[in-house]
Image (cartoon, rainbow, N blue to C red):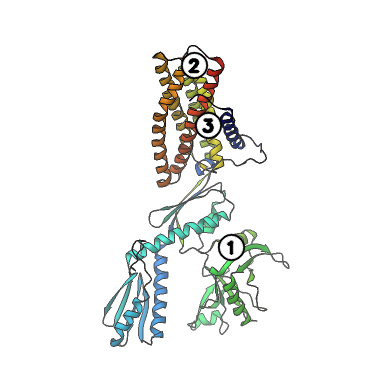
Amino acid sequence: MLYFSNSKILFLLIICVFGFFLALPNFSKINIPFLPSQTINLGLDLRGGSYLLLEVDTDSINKDRSQSLVEDIRVSLRENKIKYIGLRSLESGAEVRIQDSLKIKDAEELIRDLNNGTSGNIFNTQKADEFSITASDNLLQVILNDSSLKEKYRLAVLQSIEIIRRRIDGLGVTEPSIQRQGNNRILLEVPGLDDPQRLKDLLGQTAKLNFRMVDVSVSAGEAKRTKVPSRSEIISDTDGIQYLVMKKILVSGERLVDAQASFDGTTNSPIVNFRFDTVGGKYFAKATSGNVGKPFAIVLDNQVISAPIIRSPILGGSGQIEGGFSVEEANNLAILLRAGALPAPLEILEEKTIGPGLGQDSIESGKLATIVGLIGVLLFISISYGRFGIYANFALILNVIMIVGLLSLLQATLTLPGIAGIVLTIGMAVDSNVIIFERIRDEYANGKSPFSAVESGYSKSLGTILDANVTTLIASLVLFFLGTGPVKGFAVTLSVGIITSVFTAFVITRLIISIWLLKNKPTELSF
């Protein structure tokens, strides 16, 4: 039990040295070639940054689905030559009046075929109704079901989280915390971001991009004074200039595969270069080939950002957007287009900005707590167990170094509760040594030799130590998978600390004591 072969000693020494070099970048700027040079990422409470509580606009989701349902009903009834009047969208659905009472059943069946709901249960393949239909006096009302809407909200939140993450990654910010809260809310924490307004600008746009032709049959001003053609609508640009734009979308922004900010080679002004996928490139080539000499509008979130004239067919599937951008505006637009469109607008419910000064105060407080806790434990263990206590203290310091090293290797985010987890781990690391040393005392008091007492103490303590630490590890894993934000930070440091404390207390301390016993062969033990 106490014997370590040279190969085992070498292996343990390599682990300890490797842990030391992993932790080294956190304490100095020395970088060792061929070794990781990452440092621990600091959370929002330690580094400062921006905190936003966002809410997905569910009314917008209802409106979009209701409008698309109206269009689907219109197309279906027209294709089947069923006459109707009064087709319009409702708050959560649509309604239509069928002119021929004999066609009501046919119309109802056609509308029911538009149902695209699912049960949401992998064990149930039956299709669930997305909406219900009621008929009264030739009037058909199509009402979206609550369960269907809740599922759409859930998917919209998940999609929004992914798009938010992509947009923030485009800013070059590391380790943002993005979590779902409730049915339609998202909690966002971005450590180290000193420009919260830019973050809000990025998240404030749904980034629904499309390319449409400008209607040149009549000017926007004249159409506003008389009547806007049914095929067109009036849209303004950022300067308030109005355009009469066709409703038909030539190419959707969903076909974009890349967008990068750049500079125009002639004017040296900021622009955004974009590139479509294969299908989008074909659509774009067809649209530009058939409309040479005509203006087309680039519409972002129902606002015209550019309306250039097509000088020649654009066949390569790529182009550029000019809009009198600043460099930052061009970068932001490129990030938005690369990340994709949000399924619904986001509303900022709560906003907090934590300054780096407050974060630094938290770091200093955490350092002080860790140092005081460590010194207290070192004094206690030294006074209580003498030589063995000194060996345990060395292992305890190594334990802290290995925690820092592993957190750096895992690129974990350290929060204030995470520091509390490290302090707690320091205290818990003593438990294993106390159990072992007290058992050695009992075995020695019962008449065993020093070597036998130590060997018996370690062997009989192993089960107790594992039981205690495994149960704590299970609790910390539950906190990690079910908790959010700071709770996860606490769980990470606690989990890592449990593993390293068991390793250092049971393996490293035992190695040092066994080397001392084999070298000095003491006839008695003094505690």
Q: Is residue 257 above or below residue 29?
A: below
Mark-to-mark CA distance, 3 and 1: 45 Å
Q: Residue furthest right?
A: 266
Question: What amino acid is found at the position of numbered circle 3 in the picture?
Answer: Val
Q: Residues within 10 Å of mark 1 (few under 14, many from 20)?
A: many
Mark-to-mark CA distance, 2 and 1: 66 Å
Instruction: State yes or no: discs 3 and 2 in contact (Cβ < 8 Å).
Output: no
Q: Is residue 170 left or right of residue 119?
A: right
Lower sequence index among marks 3 and 2: 2
Residue 127 drawn at (x, y percent) = 34, 69
Residue occupying the point 36% across, 73% down: 115
Lower sequence index among marks 2 and 1: 1
**Foreground residue among 174 and 263:** 174
Residue 377 drawn at (x, y percent) = 47, 24
**Foreground residue among 54 and 12:** 12
Kindly identify which residue carries mark 3. 400
Residue 251's quadrant in the figure? Answer: bottom right
All told, the count of numbered labels is 3
Circle number at residue 384: none
Residue 344's quadrant in the figure? Answer: bottom left
Q: Residues within 10 Å of mark 2 (few under 14, many from 20)?
A: some
* Secondary structure type for disc 2: helix
Residue 288 drawn at (x, y percent) = 62, 79
Mark-to-mark CA distance, 3 and 2: 21 Å
Kindly identify which residue carries mark 2. 386
Residue occupying the point 49% across, 63% down: 342
* Secondary structure type for disc 1: helix
* Secondary structure type for disc 3: helix
**Foreground residue among 490 and 326:** 490
Q: Is residue 133 above or below residue 487?
A: below
Residue 316 drawn at (x, y percent) = 65, 73
Kindly identify which residue carries mark 1. 333
